[in-house]
Structure formats: structure tokens, C-alpha cells
Image (cartoon, rainbow, N blue to C red):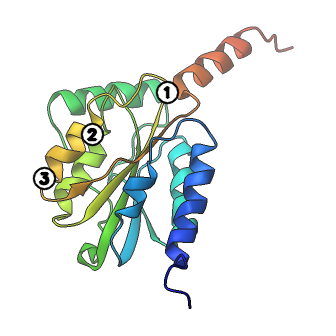
Amino acid sequence: MVPDSPTRREILMSSLLLSLTAGGGASLSPAAAAQLPEGKMLVAYFSRSGNTRVIAGQVSRALEADLFEIVPENPYPADYFETVEQARQESARGYEPPLKAQVTDVAQYTTVFLGFPIWGMTAPPVIRSFLSAHDLSGKTVIPIITHGGYGLGDSLTVVAGHATDAQLVEGFSMQAPQERQTVERVTEWLDGLTVAR
């Protein structure tokens, strides 16, 4: 093997960067990718509508990283607007909902990709729960964030504040379809239908 030949991980990382940046919304820089330490990787994610789940799955497959879905013990309501209100109340009072499960041995990972959507200009309360429940000290933490067009809000401050002894690396963010807009458009369309009775 030639000493300057890229490793399998570097090739996979380059492929991932190309696929993520192709969407135009990426903020992961090659310099950040080069800082990834050797060792096991975990992709932990929370997703309501499925957008973050798709990206987390892609990252997990490309890097051969373990995948863990962050799930609250008590699911959020199926109704979008009820979820928005519940999340707003939880964030306002600093509530961290209990998790259905935790990562069995988080100590084995050197890098944790943390995927989540932006809710109310911040990280969802369940992400705070995940960060509080897992000691990420000394680990490289890379956010994977989807949002509805209003940006990242204070989500990176939340992650940094809950994972104080981790190395937070610039991650990936992408504007994903807005669930609110989808719900409103479908409702408007349905309201225009007449059903024969």
C-alpha cells in the first residue's frame, strides 16, 4: 500500500461530503471532516416527519456507523400543531422528556453524529434529554440538522451547553420540506373538495 493512498474512511467521507454538498444546503467543511478521530462512530437522531431519518441513514451507511433513533418515552402527538405547542411548552420550562431507550455503551464511540430538526428555533427538548443522559466527554460531536427555512436558531448553543466536554465540529444543515406548510396546503386542498353524500 502506498503511504499517501487514502484510507477507506477518507474515501467514504469524501463521497459523503460530495453527496451532502450537492444539495446546496451543506455546511460541513472538508477541514472538519479531516479532524475525525479513528474509532467507532455513532449516528444518533431524532426525526418526526422522516427528513432527518433519511439523512441519518445515509450517513450511517456511508461511514458504516452504528445507528440509534432517539425516541421519547411518551411519543409526541400525531397532530403537528399539538406537537408544536407541546414542544414550545417543554422548551419554555426547560423540560427534558424521558427517553424510551439509551445508547447501551456510548463510551465505545469516538465520534457521534447528532441528527435533529429545528423546532421553534432550537433543538427539540428530546435532544436535550439525549445529551443529558449520555456522557459525550472527549468525543467529537457533529450535528446533522434539518430546518424549515429559518436557520439553526440557538440549536448549536444548546448542543454545546449540554455536551460541554465534547469537541463540537461544524456539521451539516439542510432546509427540508416544512411540515407546517405541507399540513396547511393539504388542509386547504381538502377543504376545497366536495364529497358526495
The residue that mark 2 highlights is: 156
In the image, residue 174 above or below residue 28: above
Instruction: Tell which circle, 3 or 2, labels the residue nearer the N-terminal end.
Output: 2
Horizontal side of residue 7 vs 95, given as left or right:
right
Number of marks: 3
Quarter of the figure that contains the C terminus: top right
- Describe the element under mark 2 as helix, strand or loop: helix
Identify which amino acid the numbered label 1 is placed on: Gly
Instruction: Tell which circle, 3 or 1, labels the residue nearer the N-terminal end.
Output: 1
Find the residue positioned furthest to the bottom: 1
Residue 164, numbered label: 3
In the image, residue 197 above or below residue 139: above
Residue 57, numbered label: none
Identify which amino acid the numbered label 2 is placed on: Leu
The residue that mark 1 highlights is: 148
Horizontal side of residue 37 vs 93, given as left or right:
right
Identify which amino acid the numbered label 3 is placed on: Thr
Q: Quadrant of residue 92?
A: top left
**How busy is the neighbourhood of tag 3: few (under 14 within 10 Å), some, or many (20 plus)?**
some
Give the image location of residue 168, x and y in percent.
26, 52
Q: Quadrant of residue 94?
A: top left
The residue drawn where x is 27% and y is 77% is: 105
**How busy is the neighbourhood of tag 1: few (under 14 within 10 Å), some, or many (20 plus)?**
some
- Mark 3 or mark 1: which is in front? 3
